[in-house]
Amino acid sequence: MVDGLSPETILSCVQKAVSDSKVLSLLKSALNAPVRPGSVPPPEKDLDGLAKKRLKRKVLRKSRKKKVLNENEPKPDPYWLRLFFGFAPEQACHVPNYGHCGIISPLLANVCLNELDWWMEQKINEYFCPSKHDSIWKEAGDEGCHNPAWPEFVPSAGKEKTRKMDFLRFGSHVLIGIRGPREDAVEIRRQLMEFCERTFGLRPENSMVEIEHITRGIEFLDHVITRRVIYPTLRYTASGGNIVSEKGVGTLLSVTASLQRCIRHFRKLELVKGDRDPEPLPCSPMLYSGQAHTNSQMNKFLETMADWYRYADNRKKIVGFCAYVIRSSLAKLYAARYRLKSRAKVYKIASRDLSRPLRESTRNDAPEYSDLLRMGLVDVIEGVQFARMSSIPSCDYTPFPRNWVPHHELLLQEYIKLQDPKLFCELHKTIKRQEISSPQDDVSKMVWYYKVHGVYDDNRSLMKAKELRNGEVVNGDKQLLLHT
């Protein structure tokens, strides 16, 4: 939907927050200027099998050559980061492009879709209808009304149920969760289409806005959101002080990582082949890197993948599969590099996590790896992480704190505060009043005063030293100074 936004719609959304005429004029010229044919790379043509093989060989031959960067040319991303970018979900693959705006096109799309965010927040507050039998949401639909003493589930038993709506957006992909009848979902879809047509001048097709029940599973950002029914025993203290136990029925949201999507991404990166029983392939891009550097790169990738699947119920399973693919791929790579013929021989020499050196010198007078490591002549070989299931972290069920704000929004709020000149005046006065100094200055003052006056460098001791130096007595006590 964001590709069809007109320049007038984008400018009208930007004008609500930006009043600088120069910025608006520059943005208008970038949106309305025609794009030259040579400025945009042409789309890839359909090639036959032989042409694809030739192109692949040409790219592989070019990548093996040592590339010398120019003076102002930025360094390429490391291999582990490029590998993780290959796991980008389907919702993140498409990036909008508006005329000559370039890399700020996604920012402009988010500025326009911010209108949709505000509209959805208003609809969420209007739709919220709590039930008197509900023990979680009582008065309002915000996070502050949630009772943390109760389990993290929504009761589903009884005639009256709480009606609630949630909203998620990643780029132009929107996920709306409705706890209520299907008629409400149909009505919300109709209102959403009318809002998009009225605000953005675009009406989404019915096939683009689907309604699906949560029991069938909804895939979003390579995770499947579904529902599980639980029967917990709720214990609470009644008004008379008695402990009451009740058997309840509730539904628990379940977020599961999609293993098929993970296999598909590995196959796209040419690290596995096959669908039902995927077989790892050797990691060819790291062919000319040392064992220490290769293991370090793959450990960073595995740490990032473990953090990406942090809230998935099957986190151990999916991260264990990623570790198996990476470890087997490296074992095949080392078997080809050191001519060991099989993964079993690699594991026998380098152990299960590939932490022992595989390259040993044939000279008898050569020092051992431990001696070279102690002298700092070789790098430390890190073992590939998550070699055992016990080392893989479990799913993080920690609830978000109340009024949680993303880190990037906190940075933006601090940046906005710094634009206020009054804040700089207050900071300047505070620094003058408190005499803020660096830790090195404090240490030097402490050493100097102890050496000269024999007292510890705090404010009270400094005052006592000054008074005693002037011949005064503090609180009637005599002080003994050490002279050096």
Image: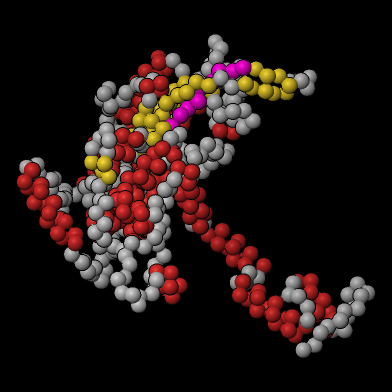
The number of discs equals 0
At which x and y percent is residue 385?
A: 42, 51
Q: Which residues are magenta?
A: 247-255
Which residue reaches farthest top? Answer: 159
For image coordinates 47% across by 27% down, the residue present is 253
Magenta span: predominant SS is strand
- Comparing 380 with 48, the one in front is 380
Question: How does the figure colour the protein chain or chains?
Answer: secondary structure
Residue 80 falls in which quadrant of the image?
Answer: bottom left
- Comparing 399 with 264, the one in front is 264
Q: Can residue 380 be seen from the camera position used here?
A: yes
Residue 288 falls in which quadrant of the image?
Answer: bottom left
At which x and y percent is residue 311?
A: 46, 38
On whether residue 444 falls in the magenta region, the answer is no
For image coordinates 65% across by 74% down, the residue present is 442
At which x and y percent is residue 256?
A: 41, 32
* Quarter of the picture holding the C terminus: bottom right
Give the vertical position of 394 relative to 145 (above or below).
below
On whether residue 253 falls in the magenta region, the answer is yes
- Comparing 319 with 333, the one in front is 333
At which x and y percent is residue 221?
A: 36, 37
For image coordinates 31% across by 25% down, the residue present is 209
Which residue reaches farthest right? Answer: 476
For image coordinates 57% across by 40% down, the residue present is 401
